[in-house]
Amino acid sequence: MPDHVLNLLWGKSELPLTLPEQWRLAGILEPCELPPVADVAAEMERSLAQPSGSPRLRDLVHGGTRIALIVDDDSGPTPVAQLVPPLLRELASGAVTADQITVVPALGLHRPMAAE
């Protein structure tokens, strides 16, 4: 049985990943193609108000909860500026205050961020 080679997207190219032949490859899962939402902030509000299979976030937190909010740095495609404000409002409605939230920029493979 030959090794399985998966090609992972890496920037604008692909990075081959070879899996040992004794590993059984059950399948490859990929996200389905969906059209982009018209209003990212409104969709975030809707998602927070109607979570799938979970209580609302504001019902899971309380005044003593410490939050680590991990966000992409500004080189990534995630619309952080549109996603974070609704999230902060949801946390505030659960009695979480700003001093209980630590924002951590996820650098990935980038150099450390400058203070500015």
Image: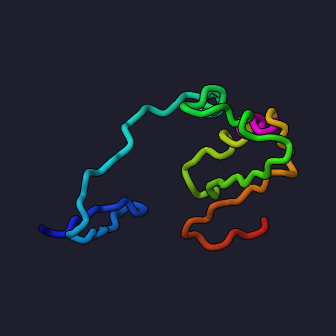
Question: Observer-nearest residue: 23 or 18?
Answer: 23
Q: Where in the figure is residue 8, as x and y percent of width and height?
A: 35, 61
Q: Where in the figure is residue 78, as x and y percent of width and height?
A: 57, 48
Residue shown at 70% from the left, 52% from the top = 69
Main structural element of the magenta stretch: helix, strand or loop? Answer: helix
Image quarter hosting the N terminus: bottom left
Q: Where in the figure is residue 41, as x and y percent of width and height?
A: 65, 33
Q: Which residues are magenta?
A: 87-92
Image quarter hosting the C terminus: bottom right
Asked if residue 69 is positioned above or below residue 81 in the image, the reply reads: below
Q: Is residue 91 magenta?
A: yes
Residue shown at 41% from the left, 33% from the top = 34
Question: Observer-nearest residue: 116 or 16?
Answer: 16
Q: Is residue 68 magenta?
A: no
Residue shown at 80% from the left, 35% from the top = 94
Residue 109 falls left or right of residue 16: right
Q: Quadrant of residue 109?
A: bottom right
Residue 26 falls left or right of residue 14: left
